[in-house]
Image (spheres, rainbow, N blue to C red):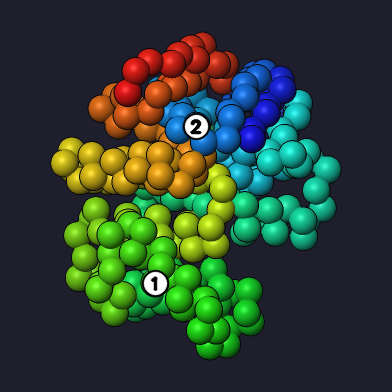
Amino acid sequence: MIRLESLTKSYRDGGNRFDVLRGVSLGVEEGELVAVMGASGSGKSTLLNVIGGLDRDYGGSAEVLGRDLSKLGDRELSRYRNESVGFVFQSFNLVPPLTVLQNVLLPGYFEGGGGQPAAAARSSARDALARVGLAGKEGRLPARLSGGERQRVALARALFRRPRLVLADEPTGSLDAQTARDVIDLLVELNVKERLTVVVVTHDEQVASRARRILRLKDGLLVDDREHAR
Ligand SMILES: Nc1ncnc2c1ncn2[C@@H]1O[C@H](COP(=O)(O)OP(=O)(O)OP(=O)(O)O)[C@@H](O)[C@H]1O
Ligand SMILES: [Mg+2]
């Protein structure tokens, strides 16, 4: 599903070059749940952004779902992001004045030119909310939800278009330990039941231990790639 070959990424700051990824090669098969760990600044988010088509200025090659991402044009890349990948971030990125259902429908609003979403879209949004255990909360405002519920809304929004790959960047970073467990349990459940491929960046060993495979980055290099019993 994901194949990275000698992935490199550098930033230029005036005359200085800073190498964030220094040749990362790895593969992730469909249906895997992989945790990515590493110190702050080791390149985890950078790696996820390349896989998700959010960053196209890199060296080496990144192939996801059979597409060489560097060969996609702007429109193809944005289509890839919208249809094939679900993103979840530490800050839930919900829009406060919108209801839970409207937040899940948000990607559809932009695409549909701001009009009223079709009945089919509303029904997929309800379905996504049911998949994350939020049936019945469609009309709530985000402010009236717990942190864990907010992250589940964000996950429902990521699942809305039925992507085959979910990329989660510290999805439990703002949650307490119990709520973090609930959110990772939900990701594990979706991975097992729906064969959703999940790559989750985390600083939390407890969260990472729920993944069968843990990748560790250090200073832009993959220093460990290990499978263990879940
Ligand atoms: N737009 C940018 N311009 C310059 N440097 C950047 C930029 N984005 C990231 N970096 C640098 O790249 C390095 C890796 O960043 P990245 O966000 O991938 O780290 P990370 O492993 O996700 O860290 P964290 O755990 O803190 O989220 C950091 O040193 C960061 O300062
Ligand atoms: Mg990061």
Point out residue 109 in the picture as x, y percentages from the top left corner. Answer: 55, 77
Q: Answer above or below: position of 215 versus 35.
A: above
Q: Is residue 2 above or below residue 126?
A: above
Using the image as rendered, state which of residue 225 and residue 43 is in the foreground.
225
Q: Quadrant of residue 99?
A: bottom left
Distance Cα–Cα, label 1 vs label 2: 26 Å
- Image quadrant containing the N terminus: top right
In the rendered image, residue 160, in percent from the top left (x then y), is placed at: 49, 63
Q: Are marks 1 and 2 in contact (CB under 8 Å)?
A: no
Q: Tell me the residue that label 1 is attached to.
A: 126
Residue 173: name its quadrant: top left
Residue at 58% from the left image edge and 41% from the top image edge: 49
When asked about the image quadrant of residue 134, the answer is bottom left
**Hey, which residue is sitting farthest bottom in the picture?**
116
Q: Secondary structure at mark 1?
A: helix
Q: Position of residue 21 (x, y in %)?
A: 62, 24
Q: Amino acid at mark 1?
A: Arg
Location of residue 227 with respect to 188 vertically, above or below: above
Residue type at numbered disc 2? Glu
